Every structure is written in structure tokens, then in C-alpha cells.
């Protein structure tokens, strides 16, 4: 079966074909031709018009009602996107099954089947970027909780009465452990330290002030992970986000976390996600294939 897979983000939309026999091909990145929801519809339709496929898998930013295939909430990153009923729209236009999955969950599923989590049935996936995203994988499936929103690790509170968070609360992990939090810290030293690459090249050149900021930021990462490890006792943590390409972070997290948790919890693997910007596409394709098979077996019974 061939799945046309999408990964919808705030600045780019990725697309590819996933074929069960040959894997991922026709990878493309599209910028928005017009902003917001209409831009999403335009890009997706143009890809659907020029490809043959059996089903459509969509990994997307925002809170997703996976059953209804609807965007429940999305920030201003994609104007007008909240409420979009993508499943309904495309199933009626193209007469093929369409499945939506939240982007962090899609990336975790990608890692579960094809990436760092391949050898594990259960693991916790965290991605560090503008915010911190999380996904709980149990038996190679996403644990969604009552409404499908479980795993919002970015909003566990690590600082009482702490900084304001985008969610409207205070002291969330997001505000301290995200890549954005690291750049904010380092830009206080020098406004040119506005991305991870510049920060880590300064660290590698021996800048001790930058190293101090990075080490304190890694401690913030650890505070959240201590809670997560004590709740789940997972065999494995998969850490994603471009910043994790810096070997220093993963090796420090490994060292610090294993001494920070209670005895008995330290026997866990800490791995870097390795599918990069293809994880969401692969996860959405896998998710869609499984949903299509499930429907088929239901229909046969
Ligand atoms: Zn928050």
C-alpha cells in the first residue's frame, strides 16, 4: 500500500510517499503559498492531485481530535487552522481514507517503528525546540489519555510561581528546558547567541560563560526528566529536536539523570531520536496503515 504522508508545521509543510515495500520517497518541503488554513489546503490538494495513493496520513501541529480528524486548537502559527476538519474535507474530495495525528505523537511513532525506539515496545519521547513536546509510547502505540492529549511534558511544572508560559500558567518545563529557553539565557551574555549552533561552537571554543549557561539549562532538562522517570520507570527515553545533535547534551543528560533518580530507576537507555525531519512523515504513514488494516479486519468480521 502507498500512503501519501504530510507533516504540517507553522512554517513548512513536508510531504512524501510511503510505500510498504520501498519506504519513503518523493520527499518535498513546501512553504505556505498563502498563510494559514487556506495555505494548508492548497498545498495538500496540489500533492494529492499529482500522486497515486491508497490513503493519506497527516502529522500536524496543534491539538488533534484523531477520531474526528479535526484540529481542536492551534496557535496563531497557522491562522484560521483551529476547527479545520481535514479528514472530512479530503475524504469527500478524494474518496480515500484520511487519518490525522498530532506531530509529536507522529514523530514518536516514527521512532517506535523505524528509529531509535525500534527495539523497545515502551518508551517516552521528548522533543526540545521552541517548546518541549512529549509522547508516551506503550506497546508501540501512543497512550493518549481520556481526550488524546496525554504526554504534554512541556507543561509539567518545574518551578513554583515561575515564568509565564504560553499555556497561561506559570513555571512550566517549556519555559526552562526548551531550546528557546537556552537561547534566551545565552542572548543575555551576547545577543549574537541566537541559535544552538552558535552557542555550541562558543562552548566548544572554551567559552566558560556559555558552558555555565548550557550546564544550568541541562539541569533544567534533568528536573523534568526526574519526574517522568519516576512516574513511568521507562526502559528508554528518546530525545529529539535539532539541538540534540549536540553530543554534549545527550552525554551530560545520561550522566546527570542516572545519578539524580532513585536507585532502581537508573537502568534506562537515553537515546537520541534519529529520523530527524522524516519522523513525522513516517509515523503518520504507519499510523494510517494500521488504522486502514483495523478498519478492513473490522469489516471482514
Ligand atoms: Zn505551560
Image (cartoon, helix red, strand yellow):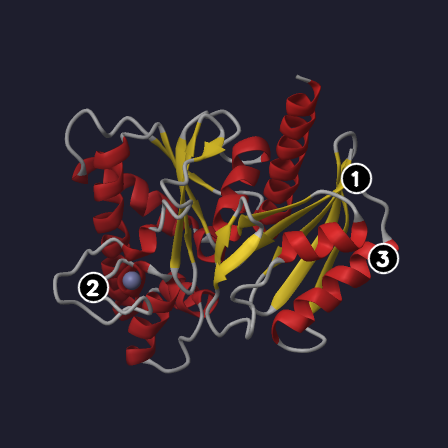
Q: Which mark is residue 171?
A: 2
Residue 109 on image: x %, y %: 53, 38
Residue 91 on image: x %, y %: 72, 50
Whether the residues at callouts 2 and 1 have beta carbons within 8 Å, the answer is no
* Pick the front one: 99 or 47: 99
Q: Quadrant of residue 18?
A: top right
Residue 27 on image: x %, y %: 74, 52
25 over 219 or under it: above or below: above
253 over 86 or under it: above or below: above
Between circles 2 and 3, the one closer to the viewer is 3
Quadrant where the N terminus sits is top right
The quadrant where ligand 1 appears is bottom left
Secondary structure of the residue carrying tag 1 is: loop
- Identified at 58% across, 44% down, the residue is 275
* Pick the front one: 231 or 298: 298
Whether residue 89 is visible: yes
Amino acid at each position: 500500500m502507498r500512503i501519501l504522508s504530510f507533516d504540517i508545521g507553522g512554517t513548512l509543510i513536508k510531504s512524501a510517499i510511503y510505500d510498504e515495500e520501498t519506504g519513503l520517497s518523493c520527499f518535498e518541503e513546501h512553504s505556505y503559498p498563502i498563510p494559514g488554513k487556506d495555505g494548508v489546503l492548497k498545498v495538500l490538494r496540489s500533492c494529492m492531485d499529482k500522486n497515486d495513493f491508497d490513503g493519506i496520513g497527516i502529522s500536524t501541529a496543534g491539538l488533534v481530535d484523531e477520531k474526528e480528524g479535526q484540529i481542536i486548537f492551534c496557535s496563531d502559527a497557522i491562522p484560521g487552522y483551529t476547527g479545520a476538519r481535514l479528514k472530512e474535507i479530503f475524504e469527500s474530495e478524494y474518496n480515500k481514507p484520511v487519518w490525522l495525528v498530532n506531530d509529536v505523537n507522529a514523530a514518536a511513532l516514527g521512532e517506535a517503528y523505524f528509529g531509535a525506539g525500534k527495539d523497545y515496545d515502551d518508551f517516552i519521547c521528548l522533543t526540545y525546540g521552541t517548546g518541549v513536546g512529549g509522547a508516551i509510547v506503550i506497546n508501540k502505540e501512543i497512550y493518549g489519555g481520556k481526550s488524546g492529549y496525554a504526554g504534554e511534558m512541556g507543561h509539567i511544572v518545574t518551578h513554583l510561581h515561575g515564568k509565564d508560559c504560553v499555556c497561561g500558567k506559570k513555571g512550566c518545563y517549556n519555559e526552562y528546558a526548551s531550546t528557546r529557553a537556552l537561547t534566551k539565557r545565552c542572548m543575555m551574555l551576547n545577543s549574537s547567541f541566537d541559535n544552538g549552533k552558535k552557542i555550541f561552537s562558543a562552548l566548544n571554543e572554551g567559552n566558560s560563560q556559555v558552558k555555565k549557561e548550557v550546564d544550568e539549562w541541562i539541569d533544567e532538562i534533568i528536573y523534568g526528566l526526574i519526574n517522568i522517570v519516576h512516574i513511568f520507570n521507562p526502559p528508554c527515553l528518546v530525545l529529539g529536536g535539532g539541538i540534540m545533535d549536540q553530543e554534549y547534551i545527550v552525554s551530560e543528560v545520561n550522566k546527570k539523570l542516572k545519578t539524580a533518580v532513585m536507585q532502581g530507576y537508573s537502568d534506562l537507555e537515553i537515546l537520541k531520536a534519529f529520523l530527524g525531519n522524516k519522523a513525522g512523515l513516517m509515523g503518520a504513514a504507519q499510523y494510517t496503515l494500521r488504522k486502514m488494516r483495523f478498519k478492513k479486519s473490522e469489516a471482514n468480521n
